[in-house]
């Protein structure tokens, strides 16, 4: 008659595949975290944990929940059948990006022209890598609001449009010099006859 042994071992999930670019696996939880096996004492005596069949994370951009299948050794079985679930936590990698963006003067009164010094700013933005990698200067829409300003030299802070998932770290320079003056009168050249 074959002698049987019971032993409780930790479940260790195995993973395969890479999550999507700009994302990372930050952890996992296993339910249940351990199982009781029944089997040959010779097999179970050596066992400290039991692995799962690999769980595929290829292209994942959010948490993955999967049923686990255990890789049971020969001459061992689960003492009782149960649902085995793993939850893998996936997060976007946080990073920052600096973009040079040309400033757009808005609200210049008729008959006036504006010169911006400098004419562009360095904008540093932080947030999830997938959003940052797609971000361009055009998305920031950097403008200098000149409404109500007359001729002369002014110092104005640029304004930017930042999507809610991103954070503005800094704008260099924080303020730009604006020189507003009258537009030169168009010179009419005598028409060649």
Image (cartoon, rainbow, N blue to C red):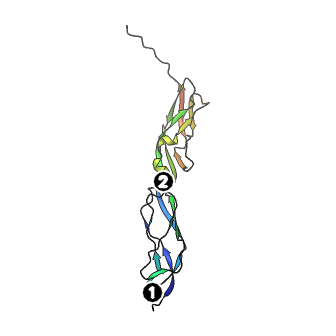
Which residue is identified by label 1? 40
Give the x, y percent position of residue 68: 49, 69
- Which structural element holds mark 1? loop
How many residues crowd around disc 2 within 10 Å: few (fewer than 14), some, or many (20 or more)?
some
Name the residue furthest front: 1
Q: Is residue 147 above or below residue 98?
A: above
Which residue is identified by label 2? 129
Which one is nearer the viewer's eye here, 80 or 21? 80
Give the x, y percent position of residue 174: 54, 44
Residue 161, quarter of picture = top right
* x 57%, y 48%: residue: 164
* x 45%, y 88%: residue: 41
* x 48%, y 52%: residue: 130
Q: Is residue 107 above or below residue 4?
A: above
Distance Cα–Cα, label 1 vs label 2: 50 Å
Give the x, y percent position of residue 95: 49, 55
Q: Is residue 29 above or below residue 179?
A: below
Q: Image quadrant for the N terminus?
A: bottom left
Name the residue furthest top: 193
How many residues crowd around disc 1 within 10 Å: few (fewer than 14), some, or many (20 or more)?
some
- Which structural element holds mark 2? helix
Which one is nearer the viewer's eye here, 90 or 153? 90
Q: Earlier in the sequence, mark 1 or mark 2?
A: 1
Q: Image quadrant for the C terminus?
A: top left
Give the x, y percent position of residue 63: 52, 61
């Amino acid at each position: 008659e074959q002698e049987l042994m019971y032993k409780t071992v930790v479940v260790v999930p195995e993973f395969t595949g890479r999550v999507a670019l700009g994302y990372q696996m930050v952890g996992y939880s296993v339910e249940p975290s351990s199982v009781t096996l029944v089997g040959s004492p010779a097999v179970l005596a050596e066992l400290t944990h039991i692995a799962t069949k690999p769980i595929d994370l290829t292209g994942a951009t959010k948490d993955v929940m999967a049923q686990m299948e255990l890789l049971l050794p020969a001459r061992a079985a689960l003492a009782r059948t149960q649902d085995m679930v793993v939850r893998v936590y996936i997060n976007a990698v946080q990073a920052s990006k600096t973009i040079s963006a040309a400033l757009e003067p808005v609200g210049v009164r008729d008959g006036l022209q504006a010169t911006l010094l400098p004419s562009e700013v360095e904008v540093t933005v932080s947030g999830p890598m997938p959003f940052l990698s797609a971000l361009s200067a055009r998305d920031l829409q950097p403008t200098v609001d000149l409404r109500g300003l007359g001729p002369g030299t002014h110092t104005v802070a640029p304004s930017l449009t930042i999507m809610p998932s991103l954070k503005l770290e800094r704008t260099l320079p924080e303020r730009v010099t604006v020189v507003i003056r009258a537009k030169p009168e168009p010179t009419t050249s005598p028409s060649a006859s």
